[in-house]
Amino acid sequence: MFNRKRSGGLTFIAQGTKLTGESEFSAEALVSGEIFGDIQSTSNITIEQDGLIDGVLNCQELRVSGTFRGKLICNKLNISSTGVVDGEVTCQSMEIFEGGQFIGMRVRDDIAFLPASSTDKHGSAKPEQIEEAQLSAG
């Protein structure tokens, strides 16, 4: 009847705790303290209102009520009304509640950006094409 198995417990980083360096979580994590560095997680991470993660984070889902700064790779990002995300985000789904802040750039996995040199070439070619079209029409 109660055969449901959990894959691990809950990792809790308490308020007043500061971790620096590389971290790896295999279960859900609740962050009320501060983490600086590279973090790998195969599960979900929640940053509480006073919590901070500053660095590179790779996880399934990130829920932010506190602050995240850095580079984020996840499937789903949820920014609450008190949350702040500042940095580069790669995710499939993003939800920002009223009052929540997103400062930075979002990139989806399936979009490939062109190198800056290719964009410059295309950008300089377009005005010439427009000028030619105007000349031939006149």
Image (cartoon, rainbow, N blue to C red):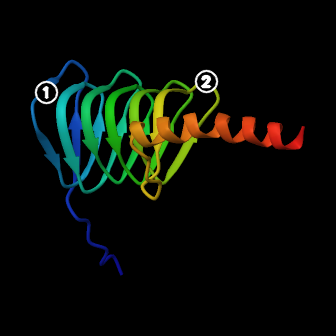
Q: Residue visible at 14% across and 46% down? A: 24
Judged left or right of residue 4, residue 117 is right
Q: How crowded is mark 1: few (under 14 residues within 10 Å), some or many (20 or more)?
A: few
Q: Which of marks 2 and 1 is nearer the N terminus?
A: 1
Location of the C terminus by quadrant is top right
Q: Give the quarter of the image for residue 81.
A: top right
Q: Residue 46, image x and y in percent?
A: 36, 40
The amino acid marked with disc number 2 is Gly
Q: Do labels 2 and 1 touch, CB within 8 Å?
A: no
Q: Which of 25 and 134 is in front in this view?
A: 134
Q: Residue at the spot x=24%, y=36% of the render?
A: 56
Residue 72, how many percent across, how many down? 34, 40
Check the image and name the residue furthest to the left: 21
Q: Specify the quadrant that holds the N terminus.
A: bottom left
The disc at residue 19 is: 1
| Residue 114 vs residue 66, the one in the foreground | 114
- Residue at the right extreme, as displayed: 138
Q: On the picture, is 13 further left or further right than 49? A: left
Name the residue at 58% across, 39% down. Answer: 125
Q: Which of 123 and 30 is in front in this view?
A: 123
Vertical position of residue 80 compared to residue 94: above or below: above
Residue 99 marker: 2
Q: In the displayed orientation, state which residue is furthest to the bottom.
A: 1
Say left or right for 105 vs 32. Answer: right
Considering the numbered disc 2 on the image, is that residue within a helix, a strand or a loop?
loop
Q: Where is residue 114 in the image (x, y as percent from the top left)?
A: 43, 46
Q: In this view, does 119 lie to the left or right of 25?
A: right
Q: Which amino acid does label 1 sit on?
A: Leu
Q: Distance between the residues labelled 2 and 1?
A: 28 Å
Residue 38: percent from the left, percent from the top? 17, 37
Crowding near pointer 2: few (<14 within 10 Å), some, many (20+)? Answer: few
